[in-house]
Image: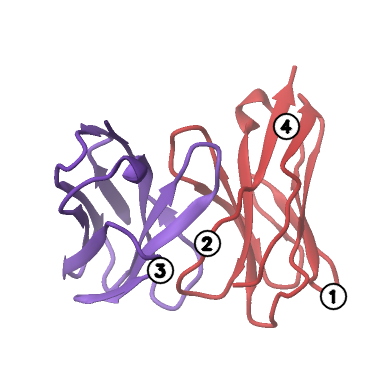
Amino acid sequence: DAKTTQPPSMDCAEGRAANLPCNHSTISGNEYVYWYRQIHSQGPQYIIHGLKNNETNEMASLIITEDRKSSTLILPHATLRDTAVYYCIARQAGKSTFGDGTTLTVKP
Amino acid sequence: SQTIHQWPATLVQPVGSPLSLECTVEGTSNPNLYWYRQAAGRGLQLLFYSVGIGQISSEVPQNLSASRPQDRQFILSSKKLLLSDSGFYLCAWSVFGQGRLFFGSGTQLSVL
């Protein structure tokens, strides 16, 4: 897996968009970018993934730069329940390790 | 649909006691299976990885072992627990050859 770098923490106002960045400058051509989030004392939950095109689902949008060296997860209208640790990983298949992620705190 | 079961949810064990955590997956065949450990406030550390029955890859030297006696069963064990084995243990699976991981609900292990 390519190494990923994320800011340790971010704040966001409730109702505003939350933009979580991730750097993966050593990503290889066949590695996908995956995003998960973990609410305290629960297993991580899959959010979205992409290879090189931008992706959107019911939870979030994923913007990947053209050179694929970084990406941004966008939660369009953050709610208090979006407060969690968000992990970005770059992998194809098989084993992978999660870094410390970004702790997103949504404030009223 | 596929589901993953992991138990128990919490466990308190004395130092030197044995450990057995079990994880089972339903609704899929030949999954890749994983054991992760998470220290408080930290990311997930991959402990073991399996691509098939009896095929276990250990990622870090430690006091733990893993076994896969059946296609959809993954067991994490220890003969003698150490204080440093405390943590949040997560089982996960993925479709063979694909990247998306599906996690269990985790076991909070406290070794006292």
Is B81 placed left or right of B91 in the picture? left
Q: Which residue is mark 4?
A: A78
Locate residue B16: give its quadrant. Answer: top left
Q: Nearer the viewer, residue B33 or A64?
A: B33
User: Tag 4, which secondary structure?
Assistant: loop
Mark 1 against mark 2, which lies toward the viewer? 2
Badge 3 crowding class, 10 Å Cα cut-off, few under 14, some 14 to 19, many 20 or more, is few
Mark 1 or mark 2, which has the lower sequence index? 1
The colour one sees for chain B in the rendered image is: purple
Which chain is in red here?
A
Q: Which residue is mark 2?
A: A97
Q: Which residue is mark 3?
A: B59
Mark 1 against mark 3, which lies toward the viewer? 3
User: Tag 1, which secondary structure?
Assistant: loop
Mark 4 or mark 2, which has the lower sequence index? 4
Residue A67's disc is 1
